[in-house]
Amino acid sequence: MNVQLLRMELKLYFRDIAAVIFGILLSPLILVVLGSIPGFRVEAPELGGRSVIQLYVPIMLAMAIAMIATSTLPVQLAAYRERGILRRLSTTPARPRDLLAAQGLVHLSMLLVGTALILGIGRVAFGVPLPGNPVGFALAYLLAVAALFGLGLLMASASTSKVAQALGTTVFFPMLFFAGLWVPREAMPEALRRIGDFTPLGAGVQALQDTTAGHWPQLLHLGVLIGYTVLAWLAAIRYFRWS
């Protein structure tokens, strides 16, 4: 790891107020709004004895990951290329994998802060239990981050900031649908739920919900996340461009 490059990326991140808001604050604020609806805090038999807000905590975690991975991360990296920052870096000993790793670590750090806020607000304000299988939860969470960050870096590696933003938006909203943001996955028809199992966010949300309930994530969802991770990161490194 190139420590100097990591420090530089951290400083640049905090100069972008929008990145801080989207990376740390937006998902916890949405959770507060949803949790303020009384009906969302009532446990329902058709939801397996859980409340709507209990289902939405994993969805908010996945949304926070996707927001950074498909919006903030690719646009920021592509903007570096347009401003010539990457070209200047290419004259240093820094390598593409050092820069991609530094970007990934900085955004992951901010994401962990947002994650702690979501879990804390869910537990303290709305009584949402903490994950019943913390080891499985951590595994599912890290794989979801790795898969989605890989897709974000791939978008940034092949485009300008405007194209990266368009790609991110095009991918972001369909993924949120299959993750259950508008219609919980439990209420989806079987066919839609099955399609969602093969999307990175759908697989991630289901794995997080399973581990929150105390179970281990299903092998299908872990395999989907690992597959996206390997393919996306290899492609991002392969197609990375300094200018």
Image: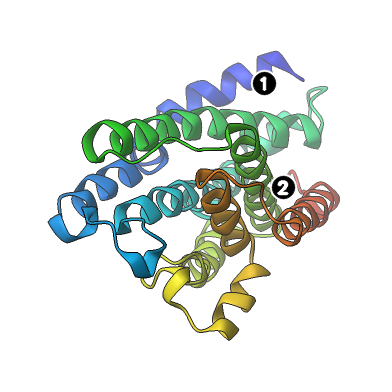
Residue 16 x, y percent position in the rendering: 39, 35
User: Where is the N terminus found, in terms of image quarters?
Assistant: top right
Separation of residues labelled 1 and 2 (CA atoms)? 18 Å
Amino acid on which disc 1 is placed = Leu
Question: What colouring style does the render use?
Answer: rainbow
Q: Is residue 16 visible?
A: no
* Residue at 63 percent of width and 77 percent of height: 194
> Disc 2 designates what residue?
243
Residue 5 shows which numbered tag?
A: 1
Per the image, label 2 sits on a secondary structure element best described as loop
First of labels 1, 2 by sequence position: 1
Residue 125 x, y percent position in the rendering: 22, 35
Counting the numbered discs, the total is: 2
Residue 241 x, y percent position in the rendering: 76, 48
For label 2, count other residues whose C-alpha is less than 10 Å away and answer few (under 14), some (14-19) or many (20+): some
Residue 131 x, y percent position in the rendering: 49, 38
Amino acid on which disc 2 is placed = Ser
For this rendering, which residue is in front, 141 or 134? 134
Dividing the picture into quarters, in which one does residue 107 lie? top right
* Residue at 60 percent of width and 58 percent of height: 160
Q: Is residue 198 visible?
A: yes
Residue 58 shows which numbered tag?
A: none
Mark in the foreground, 1 or 2: 1
Position of 30 relative to 3 (above/below): below
Task: Using residue 151 as the reference point, say whether residue 17 is left or right of it.
Answer: left
Per the image, label 1 sits on a secondary structure element best described as helix
* Residue at 59 percent of width and 85 percent of height: 191
Task: Using residue 141 as the reference point, say whether residue 184 is left or right of it.
Answer: left
